[in-house]
Image (cartoon, helix red, strand yellow):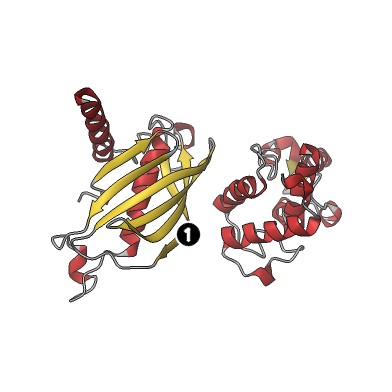
């Protein structure tokens, strides 16, 4: 299964902020049961979408050399439902970062309107810490995630070349 | 800018930091409350508190400055579950903001987390702001 809850990046500024979008569609399995007759995007998956948007932003600051693990949800609040046909935007920015961890602040928008806030903390786990039962290879930034980032980079370069 | 804050103002802001970081109620954040045992802080919460303090007071907190984490990993500083006199001196030196009165009478390693109280954080921030002033 592809555990990717963002469709593409639309903005990415190294060490600062990123924006990713996610289209909510009825074809997605989670909407069959959440809820029967009233399909809405589960908030837990919007938190995951923000974690992926912010986690890639944090990981890129160190060129994806370390695993970036979601360590804490500092805040998660939603004021509206995201229904099929809507487009979610995850706006993430780095608030604090050092060699141990990073804190990010995030806003969730639906069709351009704010519907929630998700603030997160990530731990950096490098190879020297991987003896604690963790694999030595980078198990966070897999090929699937790297494709998302590289697709954005390619689009940016192509856009720059055309202008 | 924050250097002119009174102790009450520092305490108020530290209370807000701890309420937000630990999800506790304001009446739980007494000055003697320990971060771990009383307020339920886990390891990642200590970093969260550091980040929030930096932002709230516009200060920079270096690794190990508020919560020293390398002193107890030195085998000379801990023997049979007790902090040695050398270890105690190092702790006191690196944490002038903490109250060691009770700990000195019973220097069990397991009691080290009790050194980190709300009062400890307030003292640390006050010292930091006064040094910067």
Q: Quadrant of the C terminus of chain A?
A: top left
- Image position of B65 (left or right of A144): right
Which corner quadrant of the image does residue A160 belong to?
top left
Outermost residue, front side: A163
Q: Position of residue B32 (x, y in %)?
A: 77, 63
Residue at the (33%, 57%) spot, across then down: A109
Q: Residues within 10 Å of mark 1 (few under 14, many from 20)?
A: some
Q: Is residue A131 above or below residue B118?
A: above
Query: In which quadrant of the rendered view does residue A14 lie?
Result: top left
Q: Chain of mark 1?
A: A
Say above or below: A32 vs B10: below
Relative placement, left or right, of A121 versus A90 is right
Residue B26 location (% of width, % of height)? 66, 69
Question: What residue do we see at 68% from left, 57% from top?
Answer: B13
Q: Locate residue B132 relative to residue A131 in the image: left or right.
A: right
Any part of residue A55 in sight: yes
> Observer-nearest residue: A111 or B62?
A111
Pick the residue in front: A25 or B4: B4
The x, y position of residue A143, in whole percent, is 25, 36
Above or below — where is B33 with respect to A59?
below
Instruction: Return the residue nearer the eye: B84 or B8.
Output: B8
In-front residue for pair B131/A136: B131
Q: Residue at x 27, y 64 (%)?
A: A82
In this orientation, does residue B95 appear?
no
Q: Residue furthest left?
A: A27
Label 1 belongs to which residue? Answer: A75
Secondary element under disc 1, as helix, strand or loop, is strand
């Amino acid at each position: 299964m592809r555990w990717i809850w963002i469709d593409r990046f639309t903005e990415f500024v190294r060490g600062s902020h990123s924006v990713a979008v996610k289209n909510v569609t009825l074809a997605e399995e989670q909407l069959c049961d959440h809820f029967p007759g009233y399909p809405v995007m589960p908030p837990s998956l919007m938190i995951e979408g923000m974690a992926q948007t912010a986690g890639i932003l944090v990981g890129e600051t160190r060129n994806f050399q370390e695993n970036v693990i979601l360590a804490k949800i500092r805040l998660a609040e939603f004021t509206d439902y995201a229904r099929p046909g809507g487009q979610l935007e995850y706006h993430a920015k780095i608030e604090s970062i050092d060699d141990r961890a990073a804190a990010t602040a995030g806003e969730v928008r639906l069709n351009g309107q704010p519907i929630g806030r998700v603030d997160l903390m990530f731990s950096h786990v490098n190879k020297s810490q991987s003896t604690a039962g963790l694999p030595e290879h980078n198990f966070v930034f897999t090929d699937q995630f790297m494709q998302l980032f590289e697709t954005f980079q390619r689009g940016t370069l192509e856009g720059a070349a055309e202008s | 800018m924050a250097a002119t804050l009174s102790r009450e103002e520092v305490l108020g802001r530290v209370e807000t930091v701890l309420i937000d970081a630990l999800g506790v109620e304001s009446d739980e954040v007494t000055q003697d409350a320990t971060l771990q045992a009383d307020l339920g802080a886990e390891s990642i919460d200590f970093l969260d508190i550091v980040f929030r303090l930096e932002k709230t007071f516009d200060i920079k907190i270096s690794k190990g400055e508020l919560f020293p984490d390398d002193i107890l990993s030195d085998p000379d500083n801990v023997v049979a579950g007790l902090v040695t006199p050398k270890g105690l001196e190092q702790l006191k030196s690196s944490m002038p903001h903490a109250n060691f009165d009770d700990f000195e009478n019973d220097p069990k390693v397991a009691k080290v987390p009790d050194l980190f109280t709300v009062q400890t954080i307030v003292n640390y921030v006050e010292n930091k702001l006064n040094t910067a002033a």
